[in-house]
Image (spheres, rainbow, N blue to C red):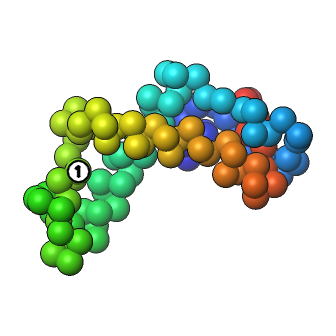
Amino acid sequence: MKLAALGCRAVRESSPDARAFEFTDEEVAHLARMEHDRWVEERRRGGWTTGQRDPERLMTPFLVSWEDLSEEMREVDRLFVRAIPEALAKLGFSIVRD
């Protein structure tokens, strides 16, 4: 879903330079926001609520909109996005632009 949002797709044929694929800064920003929104929805469906971090009570302070998320936590989402090409390459996939 994330790759398709950028006009990209994963293909089974991993090339030697598969790990060299990089998203543009704009793509990273877009995908990071998508990832945060996905995570928030997943947590809400699981019964999590906003509050001081307490996994036993299903509470997290990060269950907020992207606009209300700290820059530090936005960077966490960006790091996950930047890791997608290498993660896919380890599974034998390359990212190609359509």
Q: Residues within 10 Å of mark 1 (few under 14, many from 20)?
A: some
Locate the C terminus by quadrant: top right
Q: Is residue 94 above or below residue 92?
A: above
Could you tell me if residue 8 is visible in this image?
yes
Q: Is residue 49 above or below residue 79?
A: below
Out of 4 and 90, give the one closest to the viewer.
90
User: In the rendered image, which residue does mark 1 sit on?
Assistant: 62
Q: Is residue 44 above or below residue 73?
A: below
Q: Secondary structure at mark 1?
A: loop
- Residue in the image at 34% along x and 46% along y: 37
Q: Position of residue 72 (x, y in %)?
A: 31, 37
Tell me if 16 is positioned left or right of 69 in this view: right
Out of 33 and 60, give the one closest to the viewer.
60
- Residue in the image at 50% along x and 46% along y: 80
Q: Farthest front residue? A: 72
Q: Position of residue 60 (x, y in %)?
A: 20, 59
Q: Give the image quarter of residue 50.
A: bottom left
Q: Position of residue 40 (x, y in %)?
A: 29, 54
Tell me if 68 is positioned left or right of 37 in this view: left
Q: Is residue 47 above or below residue 60?
A: below
Amino acid type at image mark 1: Phe
